[in-house]
Image (cartoon, rainbow, N blue to C red):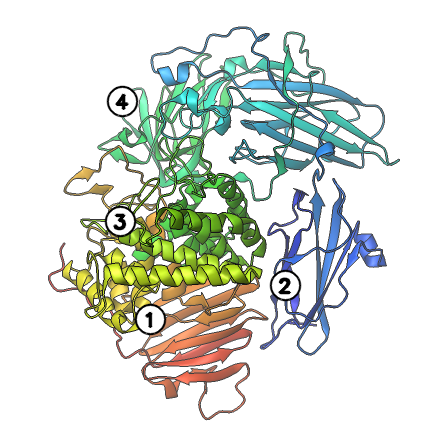
Amino acid sequence: MSGALTPYGLTCEMLDRPLGLDERLPRLSWKLRSGRRGDAQSAYRITVALSEADLDMGRVVWDTGRQESADSVLVPYDGPPLQSSTRYHWRVAVWDGEGEETGRAGSWFETGLLHADDWRAVWIARDPATAPVMEPPRDDDRTERTRHLLPCPHLRKPFVLDGRRPVRARAYVSARGLYELRLNGRRVGDAELAPGWTEYDRRVQYQTYDVGHLLNEGENVVGAVLADGWWSGFVGFDARHQAMHYGVAPQLIVQLLLDFPDGSRRWVLSDGGWRAQAGPVRYSDMLMGEYVDAREELPGWDRPGYDDAGWTPAAVADTSTGVLEAACDQPVRVLEELPARSVRRLDDDRCVVDLGQNMVGRVRLTVRGAERGRRIRLRHAEMLTGDELYLDNLRTAEATDVYIASGEPVETFEPRFTFHGFRYVEVTGYPGDLRPKDVTGRVLHSDVPWTGEFACSDATVTRLQSNIRWGQRGNFVSIPTDCPQRDERLGWLADAQVFLPTACRNADVGAFFARWMRDVVDAQHPDGAFPDVVPELCLDREGAPAWGDGGVIIPWQLYRVYGDRRVLERSYPAMKAWVDHVHRNNPGLLWRTAVGNHYGDWLQVGVETRRDLLATAYFARSAELVAATAGVLGHDDDAKYYGALHASVREAFIDAFVDADEGRVAGDTQTGYLLALAFDLLPGHAVPAAVDRLVADIEARDRHLTTGFVGVALLCPVLTAHGRADLAYHLLHQDTYPSWAYSIRHGATTIWERWDGWTRERGFQSPAMNSFNHYSLGSVGDWLYGGVAGIGQAPGSVAYRELLLKPAVGGRLTWARARQVTPRGTVSCGWTLEDGVLTLDVIVPPGPGATLVIPTGDPGGVRESDRPLTGTPGATGIEITETGPGSLSVGLASGHYRFTAAPPRQWPGFHPPPGRKP
């Protein structure tokens, strides 16, 4: 049926065809599309079987039967217990609103090792007792930090398949450190920096690979290269390197499962029978860089027939496997390539390459005509100072890769176990002329699906959205991190919680953050304090207001956006413990005793928001969200208790910090007013005056912001919610310091850590803390989607079940549009102002209802598909719900719509402030 209701985008545990899950009750989801207005799912049926043929024949493991339900998000499996290492095929059929079955779609998921005794392999490593002593490479540029770093070990084991080919072959692999798995001379999979960074003392993720196509009849060889990674390399900014290790050297665990046609199985395991050797990677560290001596290559080491008599036996490092868990989010991958924009020679031996974009990853360098032993060095930086790299802000990170040529006519160097944050690369020692085509930036980040798009008529605002996305790319590397160029790269909870709404607009980060939340919960201290960073290895800091509160705010946001009830269930005890911790230490309900740290509104400009005010606002917010979570989970007594606690903290906040008669919030800072307004911490009658004071402060500063990390995400949404979208637009377009556009005027291609990372008057800020790739101040991106383009949820809606489309037309813009793939389907909202006519184009997916608020000076003149709404009965899928002096609200069923109307009365909108500074 053409245009009929159809399921698509099937996922299991928010992943597309996951290989190696260890969830016992995985959840199945699908999206819907239709070419017909008003379409909606009235029922579904899920069937699960061991093959597609079994699905066709009705030989099923689980059958829901026809379920009269509109559910399509995270429907839990409820069949017989799943078996380890088994692929399950599933199919969903849907019925439309008229009761007709209109579409089917299928997918699969495969279980990993579900039981502790499924693991037979052991952890192995290169045995330092039997490995020959090898002098580390010595050259003029080596530092004390890198001299002690050891070569990356190679490990191998041959095995024979005597005339039998398996019908299925799986590799279950992990490392303490980083690994690259090899099988018969070929790399297995494309995951980078695997297995990723977790709270290694509690969990280490393993990956599952289909390796059947890589096997040979006869002799086979499985091998791996290991590197220190987060396990035993430099991590964070603590100079006490030895004290920071989880371990002292990397370890490997591998389990190959081979299934044969007769039903028999064979395991090939990591054990003491493997052999080990150093190779060409003389060291690799994620902060310091990678050193490769191509003269030390081991040709054929990962293929059959190689003589490993000179290698040493691998050591069994550990036999316990209890920390191993299946990977439950997307791996890091190389996801984009950037060609070099230019090469500029500095002197006879040095060139600077400009990739045109601040990025995170590494360089692939083609080397032509280098004599054997030639040393080529690559240093990485985000900025230039004059013609030279600006390196001061790297602090102790060296971000330097070295390649010693083998002497082949053409060689390719690309590091494997490190990454850098950079736009510019200084290449020293390259033979002859370095050409742009010889240098490629290889962009690394967690492979979360991009699901959102925003664009508008203003090039600077569109560039801002691009910078936000690039900041998200570069800082979503296994965990939500920060500062990918320097010795930090840590999972700060406040940074993550303020940026999460924007991250959810740009990409599907449901699985990514749900996995990280497991580590956040595990890292909670016995007294209930969350740490400031997770994983917590190198920074013993706990309990900062807005930082620790991330442990409450993040799971709630994941539930609201993705409908992930399970992340609430798993996080709830820790969420309660955090609020109880704050309450226990502040029985007077004003958070003035910070047991751990207190950063305030980090990097605010020229003001100081009272720390007790900020902390108490977050105390109230976290108590409110714990009460809401208790309600969702059916913990009625908890809901009452934390609801009452929230009311009491709110009252204490008002008494201590609010002059209700004048609407004044203590400290008179923008962030103070924003917290009070956003978190509903004001008496109703004081709200208008508080808004006026917020506006007055912005106007008094020539329409500039003062907000730091905590306040910036609230600024434009709060102004818009209280009728001052015009001022939000002024801030968006402002291009003098401090502003988003100021950095763009000066060449920024990512979001900077601080508003004054570089200014014309003062140059670079202190190198002690000055990243040019940091997502926190980019949290305005949520407002671009939800305010400018207008895509949002109705209050109380979960997973976009009820849409609220409310575009704020204004500023310098003549058009804006956004598209967002929600858990239920694609939503789109955009507007254009041309020749005195406002045009809105809207897409509502099947199922969710939507309320569209049309900003117009003439509600009676609104037309849809060139037909008047008022006075014309039968407009399909449209219901007028409210008419006001400046808007018309209509209820929409699913479908595509085009509305035309007179523009808002305040149009033409943006007027630059008088006396604007150049």
Q: Amino acid at mark 1?
A: Val
Name which residue type carries label 3.
Arg
435 versus 625 height, above or below: above
Label 1 element class: loop
Q: Residues within 10 Å of mark 2 (few under 14, many from 20)?
A: many
Please indicate, yes or no, whether residue 492 appears anywhere in the rendered image.
yes
Seen from the viewer's position, the closer of residues 820 and 664 is 664
Residue to which mark 4 is pinned: 347
Q: Label 3: how many residues lie within 10 Å, few (<14), some (14-19) or many (20+)?
A: some
Instruction: Tell whether 320 sits left or right of 584.
Output: right
Q: Are marks 3 and 2 in contact (CB under 8 Å)?
A: no
Q: Local crowd at mark 4 within 10 Å, few (<14), some, or many (≥20)?
A: few
In space, the residues marked 3 and 4 are separated at their CA atoms by: 52 Å
- From the viewer's perspective, is 274 left or right of 409? right
Residue at position x 26%, y 57% in the image = 672
| Depth check, front residue: 262 or 237 | 237
Q: Residue 611: which disc?
A: 3
The x and y percentages for residue 492 are: 40, 42
Q: Is residue 538 above or below residue 152?
A: below
Q: What kind of element bears circle 4?
A: loop
Query: Mark 1 or 2 closer to N-term?
Result: 2
- Which residue is at the far right? 262
* Sequence-first disc among 3 and 4: 4
Q: Give the residue at x 38% y 18%.
A: 145
Residue pointed to by mark 2: 72
- The residue beneath circle 1 is 809
